[in-house]
Image: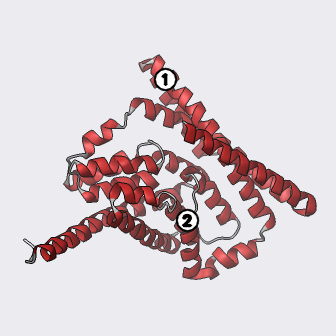
Amino acid sequence: MKKEKKGMKRDLIILSLMLVATLVLVIVFPENEGAVVNTSLDFLVEMMMILPAVMVLLGLFAVWVPKEIIGKYLGHTSGVRGILLSLLLGALPTGPLYIAFPMASALLAKGAKRSNIIIFLSAWACIKIPQEMVELQFLGLEFMLTRLFLTIIFVVIMGISIQKIIEWSEKRGIGEAAGHGPK
Amino acid sequence: MNISAIIINIIAIIGLIIAFRMNRKKAVGSLKMAVKGFIKMLPMVLIIILAIGLLLGFVPSSTISKFAGEQSGIWGVLIVGLLGAVLFIPSLLSFPLAASLLEGGASLSVVVAFITTLTMIGTVTLPLEIRELGKKMALLRSGMSFIIAIVIALIMGAIL
């Protein structure tokens, strides 16, 4: 709670500095005023058309889909089902990435597959449903879908590669430490 | 009002109607969270919007396209991708920022790299990631995310 207030205060300070800087710049260079004001207003209007709706959806998900569900389903699935579930659970609108790290760590400790955790974290970071909505609004359907499709493919490849790399390095580590080859 | 905004608002309204039918109390709770989240996000939204206004109002297109346009080539993609990895901006706001760069003359690849690294890699949250996942996994994830961001950016630049 305290940390949240501090973040808000910091944002407000930055905002005031930005406002002052903008005012000074516009007064010194009045010929740019039109462009600055028009662009800011355009983007503000576009943002305000969707931000309340996105926030409502975030609120609905936060209340109806508790975080525990993610642990319940992601803990012990593997194969294609595990990959799909990791993508899906990561994409649910559930908050910023830093709250996903402790969850990921708890799941790893419980024996979840590393590849699934990486896929889950990446989905959480960049294919979240509310993000896709804002992307659709500002960059269009073709851009959003192409990027979504490519991201899913590469995130899965990355998850599996990291799993293999860590398995390989652990095997080598154990082999060296014990003085004999890997099992 | 554009079609995407209409669709998103319709989904939110339908969601709210269903929520209120299912459980009034929980639905009110979600609305309260939505208002709180909105207020919390507002200053950052205004910061980004002012930044966009200043960027497009003061920086000429020729400058943006020199550093981030087609002629900036792979270096533009790499540098802006790196910038995205270092900056700490809420993911939702990376999209209007990206759209403004595109409008200002940046290339599609550069914009894709920016969005992808900004959302996937957090230099500010890296210490937390290392603590929770271990050095090896955290660094591998961040490093490989950067590589795939560049690859996705180059593919999108080529096909769109």
Q: Is mark 1 on a helix, strand or loop?
A: helix
Give whichever of A181, A135 is nearer the camera. Answer: A181
Percent position of residue B129, x then y: 40, 57
Query: Please, is residue A84 above or below residue B160 in the view?
Result: above
Q: In this rendering, would B99 be left or right of A129?
A: right
Q: Mark 2 points at which residue?
A: B86
Instruction: Name the amino acid, label 2.
Output: Val
* CA–CA distance in space, label 2 to label 1: 37 Å
Q: For marks 2 and 1, give the one nearer the viewer.
A: 2
Same chain under badges 2 and 1? The reply is yes
Quarter in which the N terminus of chain B is drawn: top right
Q: What residue do we see at 61% from left, 45% from top?
A: A7
Q: Name the residue under label 1.
A: B27
The front one of B9 and A14 is A14
Is residue A154 something that shows in the picture? no
Q: Residue B117 carries which label?
A: none
Residue at image point 56% right, 27% down = B32
What is the crowding at mark 1: few (fewer than 14 residues within 10 Å), some, or many (at least 20)?
many
Secondary structure, mark 2, is helix
Q: Position of residue B57 (x, y in %)?
A: 80, 62
Image coordinates for residue A48, horizontal then vertical, percent: 67, 41
Residue at image coords 54%, 70%: B81
Amino acid tagged 1: Ala
Q: Which of B139 and B45 is in front in this view?
A: B139
- Which residue lies at the image location 27% right of the left edge and 59% below the top edge? A115
- The chain letter for the residue carrying disc 1 is B
| Sequence-wise first label, 2 or 1 | 1
Q: Position of residue A144 (x, y in %)?
A: 51, 57
Residue B8 lies, with reference to residue B125, above or below; the image says above
In this rendering, the count of numbered labels is 2
Specify few, some or many for label 2: CA neighbours under 10 Å numbering under 14, 14-19, or 20 or more.
some
